[in-house]
Image (cartoon, helix red, strand yellow):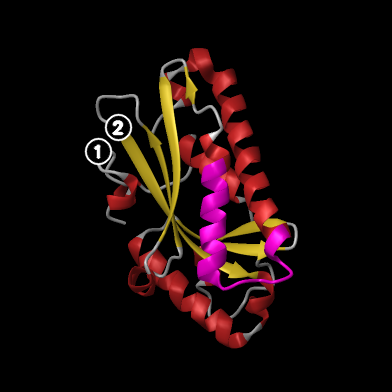
Amino acid sequence: MTLIEEHPEHEQALEQLLNSLQHTVDHAVRTVCQEQYEHRPHESIITGRLIQQIEAEVRHAQLELGGLQLEVLARDFPQVAERKVGADLYVSVARLDTDAPKTKGMLVQVKWDHALARSDEWRRLRNQSKRMLRRSEESETWILTPNGVRVVDARKTANEHRPNNLFEEATTPGQIIADGLRCERGDMKIGRDPYEEPSQSDR
């Protein structure tokens, strides 16, 4: 999905837009972590809160510029699908202003940081990561900390044992979403159908 390269006249403004989007998403997930860390609800509950907060913040962001119309969506997986795919969360980025809209997807497993110290939980994450990677290389683990979310490539969390350098090169949800719109992340093979309602799209 090419954005900046097709619109060099908007390069600076578009980069400012994407930086603002990155900040907006990271602020949204940090708010959820800070509010929920003490109680640390189940993954399904915290995933729902992350989706709610991301979409509430993004809804108020301006994602149009010089005719470009961009979209960011986050959706959870039903329990049956989560067991099959290994992901809690599906993130879609799209450009919708062309005759042939372009969409890309990313798969996400969500974990609390404290849980990964347990060998049984790491084994569970390892298996989930392997299932995600079978579907798409654009798969990540979002690790929730008291101060926000660290995004780790699923290839690391698919390891037999937890790597000592787990957080080396970790990034943030805002960064991977903005990079998806920059053409640096995301998988077009799992992009949602832009002609369907988001809730109906096959993930």
Task: For mark 1, give the secondary structure.
Answer: loop
Q: Is residue 60 visible?
A: yes
In which image quadrant can residue 2 be found?
Answer: top left
Q: Which residue is mark 1?
A: 195
Q: Nearer the viewer, residue 133 or 33?
A: 33
Going 47% across and 36% down the picture, which residue do you hit? 181
Residue 104: percent from the left, percent from the top? 37, 44
- The magenta stretch is 35-56
| Count of numbered labels shown in the rendering | 2
Residue 162: percent from the left, percent from the top? 62, 77
Q: Which residue is mark 2?
A: 101
The C terminus appears in which quarter of the rendering? bottom left
**With respect to residue 35, does 185 lie above or below?**
above
Going 59% across and 19% down the picture, which residue do you hit? 12
Q: Determine crowd level at label 1: few under 14, some 14-19, many 20+ residues with C-alpha closer than 10 A.
A: few
Residue 53 belongs to the span the image colors magenta: yes
Residue 135 belongs to the span the image colors magenta: no
Q: Nearer the viewer, residue 145 or 59?
A: 59
The N terminus appears in which quarter of the rendering? top left
Q: Is residue 167 visible?
A: no
**With respect to residue 197, does 20 lie above or below?**
above
Residue 154: percent from the left, percent from the top? 50, 64
Left/right placement of residue 86 relative to residue 150 reads: left
Q: Are marks 1 and 2 in contact (CB under 8 Å)?
A: yes
Going 62% across and 33% down the picture, which residue do you hit? 19
